Amino acid sequence: MTEQDDRAAAERLVEVHARIEAAEAEADRPRGAVSLIAVSKTFSADVIEPVIHAGQRVFGENRVQESLGKWPALKERYPDIELHLIGPLQTNKVKEAVGLYDAIQSVDRDKLARVLAKEMDAQDRRLRLFVQVNTGAEPQKSGILPQETAAFVRRCQDEYGLEIAGLMCLPPAGEPPAPHFALLAKLAGEAGLTGLSMGMSADYEIAIAHGATHVRVGSAVFGARAKQT
Ligand SMILES: *Cc1c(COP(=O)(O)O)cnc(C)c1O
C-alpha cells in the first residue's frame, strides 16, 4: 500500500459521498438520509485503514471467515466501527457472527432467525437485522421470495422476538435494477419497515431515487477487486 493508493481511496470516498448527497437532493430527501456501507470484502486491513482514517466508519463484508481475519483487530483500534454482514450466513457460524458484526443483512429463513434470536440472547448483544429478499426469484441466490416476505418478517417479529430494521436485495446481474428497488420499497412499506439496503457501485444513485436508506458500495470506494475464489 503506497501513500498514493491511500490518497486514491480517500479521494474516491469523498467522491462517493458527494454523489450520495447529490442523489439525496435530487430525490428531495434530507441530507444524511442514506448511510454509506463501504464494502471491503477481499481487501486487507492495510487497504481498509486509510478509508477509516478518511472518516468512514460503516463497513460491509460478505464472509464470516474472512471478516474474522481482519476485523477484530481493526475494531479494537477503532471502537466506533459498525460492521455489517452482507453475505449468506450458515447457522453453524451464527455464534461467531453475533460476536463480530453489528448488523446482519442476510436474514432469510426461519432456522437462521431462530438461531440468531437465541444467540443474541446468549451473548446479550442486539444486532441490527435486515431480511434479504430474492427479488428476482433466482434459484442460486439467497433471500426470501417476494411473496413470502411479509409473513416471514411477521414471524421474525412475533415468533422469534427479533427487531427487523429493514429489507435488503441484490438484483439479478445484467438486469435493470430499478424494478427490483421499487419492489423492495413496496415490500418494506407493506411490512411496515423503513430500512432499505439496496444499491451498489454501479447503481446506488438509482437506489437512492427509490428510497434506499443504506447503499453497499465496494469497488467505487476501494477500487477493482480481484475475483473472489
Ligand atoms: C460485493 C457486494 C457489494 C458491493 O459491490 P460493488 O459492485 O463493488 O459496489 C454490495 N452488496 C453485496 C451483497 C456484495 O456482495
Image (cartoon, rainbow, N blue to C red):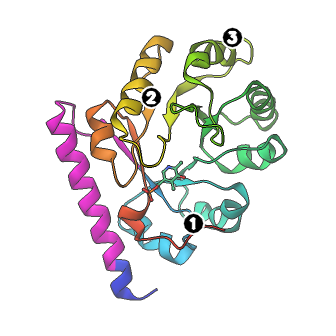
Decide: few, some or many residues near mark 3? Use Cα within 10 Å; few <14, some 14-19, many ≥20.
few
The answer to whether residue 77 is above or below residue 150 is below
Cα gap from disc 1 to disc 2, whole angstroms: 29 Å
Question: Mark 1 CB in 8 Å range of ligand 1?
Answer: no
Closer to the camera in the image, 161 or 148: 148
**First-in-chain label (1 vs 2):** 1
**First-in-chain label (3 vs 1):** 1
Horizontal side of residue 212 vs 73, given as left or right: left
Q: Position of residue 57 (x, y in %)?
A: 44, 55
**Can residue 59 be spotted in the picture?**
yes
Say whether residue 35 is magenta.
yes
Q: Position of residue 114 (x, y in %)?
A: 79, 26
Numbered range of the magenta stretch = 7-36
Amino acid on which the number 2 mark rests in the picture: Gly
Question: Considering the numbered disc 1 on the image, is that residue within a helix, a strand or a loop?
Answer: helix
Number of numbered labels in the structure image: 3
Cα gap from disc 3 to disc 1, whole angstroms: 38 Å
State the residue position of label 1: 77
Residue 134, quarter of the rendered image: top right
The answer to whether residue 6 is above or below residue 216 is below
Q: Any mark on residue 174, and which?
A: none
Amino acid on which the number 3 mark rests in the picture: Asp
Q: Position of residue 9 (x, y in %)?
A: 36, 72
Residue at figure coordinates x 42%, y 15% from the top left: 189
Decide: few, some or many residues near mark 2? Use Cα within 10 Å; few <14, some 14-19, many ≥20.
many
Cα gap from disc 3 to disc 2, whole angstroms: 19 Å
**Can residue 127 be spotted in the picture?**
no
**First-in-chain label (3 vs 2):** 3
Question: Mark 2 CB in 8 Å range of ligand 1?
Answer: no
